[in-house]
Amino acid sequence: MSSATSYNKFDEPFARIYNENLGPSYNKIALPTLEKLLLPYIPEKANILDLCCGTGQLSQWLLNKGYEVTGIDRSQRMLQYARENAPNCKLILGDVRFFELPPTFHAVSSMGLGFNHIQNLEELTNTFHNVYDALHPNGIFVFDLRLEDAYSYTLNGRLLGDVKDDYAWAMKNIYHPESKECRVFVTTFQLRERDCWKRLDTSFSVFGYSKTEVLLSLEKVGFTEMSVSDVKLDLGLIPEADMVCVFCRKPS
């Protein structure tokens, strides 16, 4: 299955799960992370590119702080929610592996584990190249990521879910260490009529990378001042986060 085909499964039903549950949950980590690692180092009214912007809640938070924000996501359904959540944000339907934008951004951020959906290191490096080209000299790049150990030890077999009056969902992770692939299985139940529920099963893959792979890839592209912060141990945020945040800079 191609990554493009896999990613299309973010359209309903997963986009609703992300909009109502996962997106707000990730933002509890993303907002204080950006306040520590990004906002102190960019000018007022900076131009920020929000990669894998999802359903737009984070983009709107940045807009509320006075920044100019452009969001990119390759799920049409995600962007439909984003247009509701961040109506004044410039939104682009596009693939982070292949986008081309001029160097007009003071900062690029990607929060919410979007880069774990990139299926191999070559494509991840291509994404870093695209980010580098879109940044001003001295621009900052901040993104979060789950490293392969998080999928192997903490998240393997984990079950999540929620139940509402007209909607219910469950999601389970199964990790394959030989390929660094975590298969995510999603089951939803949608109330169609009284006492009549429709079940839908789908799945997609996310991938783990090592810290060394990520840093070498950034260095290959040309980024400097690279650092990796554990969200729990270094930033003191949500204990169950099991992710890191990477900071780097395009040299002047």
Image (cartoon, rainbow, N blue to C red):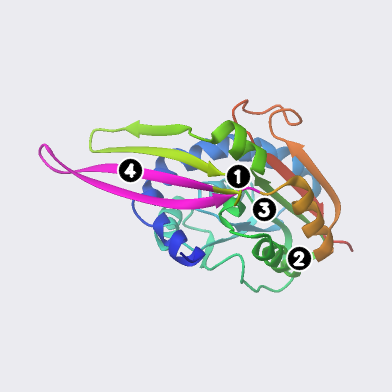
Q: Quadrant of residue 185?
A: top left
From what the image shows, is residue 34 above or below residue 75? above
Q: Is residue 13 left or right of residue 207?
A: left
Which quarter of the figure has residue 47? bottom right
Sooner in the amino-acid sequence: mark 2 or mark 3: 3
Q: Which residues are magenta?
A: 182-208
Residue lying at 83% horizontally and 63% vertically, measured from the top left: 220
- Residue in front for this viewpoint, 145 or 69: 145
Closer to the camera: disc 2 or disc 4? 4
For residue 61, above or below residue 218: above
Give the class, few, some or many, for how many residues have Cα within 10 Å of label 4's Cα (few <14, many ≥20). some
**Would you name the residue on which mark 1 appears?**
177
Amino acid type, residue under disc 4 in the picture: Thr
Q: Residue at x 34, y 54 (%)?
A: 12
Q: Which comes sooner in the sequence, label 1 or label 4?
A: 1
Judging from the image, what secondary structure is the residue with disc 4 in? strand
Can residue 48 be seen from the camera position used here? Answer: yes
Give the number of callouts: 4
**Residue 136 at x, y = what percent?**
79, 65
Q: Which dot marks residue 8? A: none
**Mark seen at residue 132:** 2
Mark 1 vs mark 3, foreground winner is 1
Residue type for callout 1: Pro
Is there CB contact under 8 Å for labels 1 and 4? no
Q: Circle 4 is placed at which residue position?
A: 187
Confirm or deny contact between disc 1 and disc 2 (CB under 8 A).
no
Please name the amino acid that badge 2 sits on: Tyr
* Dominant SS type (magenta): strand
Q: CA distance from mark 1 to mark 4?
A: 24 Å
Q: Quick check: 245 left or right of 189? A: right
User: How far is mark 1 from mark 2, CA to CA?
Assistant: 30 Å
Which residue in the protein does label 3 denote?
109
